[in-house]
Amino acid sequence: MNAARTATAEAIDALLPQTQCTRCGYEGCRPYAEALASGAAAINQCPPGGAATIAALAQLLGRAALPLNPANGLEGPPEVACIDESRCIGCAKCLPPCPVDAILGTARSMHTVIAELCTGCGLCIAPCPVDCITLVRSPADAVPAPHLNRARFEAHRARDARRAQAREALLAARKHAAQAPGARPAGSAP
């Protein structure tokens, strides 16, 4: 059995930068690691990891190192999101896509990025209706550790799952109440 088949998704995931940027074509680092473990993905799809990550993956998986696939993006210096607070309208559309909860703010108030937590994924840029978010170069010593990125990402996903379950339970309770004998049709007078 070759090395590519014996490497686990956990071992592969540990080599990835955990930016959760989706530029590899997968919804996060773990799904990309699973695709690599199964042989369904190439090792050169992670722009944030760049050449160093490709070399580490090649060694772990027993594959030849490849140049970064330009279709996935370009390797560059570490970046963080920056919000022009004078232009922020407080729409809160940047909050849900941030995979590590590095943006602080609420609806109808100014938002800001906690630079020490930001992975520079850029997922907050597209939803901003006033284009007040840009990526700026981050000092190399300010790049968050991958294991901390992973922990914040998992906490973000767990919270989203709990909210979805609570929403489903509320809708089910309302539907049950509406279908109960003696329930009034919606919009009818008491």
Image (tube, rainbow, N blue to C red):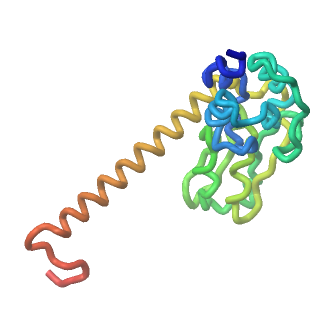
Q: Residue at 68% of width from left, 59% of height from top? A: 127
Identify the residue at image location x=81%, y=38%. Answer: 79
> Toward the viewer: 88 or 37?
37
Up the image or down, 131 lies above or below 19; here it is: below
Image spot of residue 65 (x, y percent): 87, 25
Question: Which residue is at a point 78% across and 27% down the rendered structure image?
Answer: 142
Q: Is residue 18 visible?
A: no
Q: Is residue 139 left or right of residue 169?
A: right
Residue closest to the far bottom: 189
Name the quadrant containing residue 140.
top right
Image x and y of residue 138, in percent: 83, 34
Q: Is residue 155 left or right of residue 25?
A: left
Residue 39 in picture, x, y percent from top left? 70, 31
Residue displayed at 65% across by 17% down? 6
**Residue nearer the viewer, 67 or 74:** 67
Q: Is there any visible trace of residue 119 in the rendered image?
A: yes
For the N terminus, the quadrant is top right
Return the x and y of residue 149 as percentages of the image width and height. 64, 30
How many dots with numbers? 0
The residue sitting at the left extreme is: 182
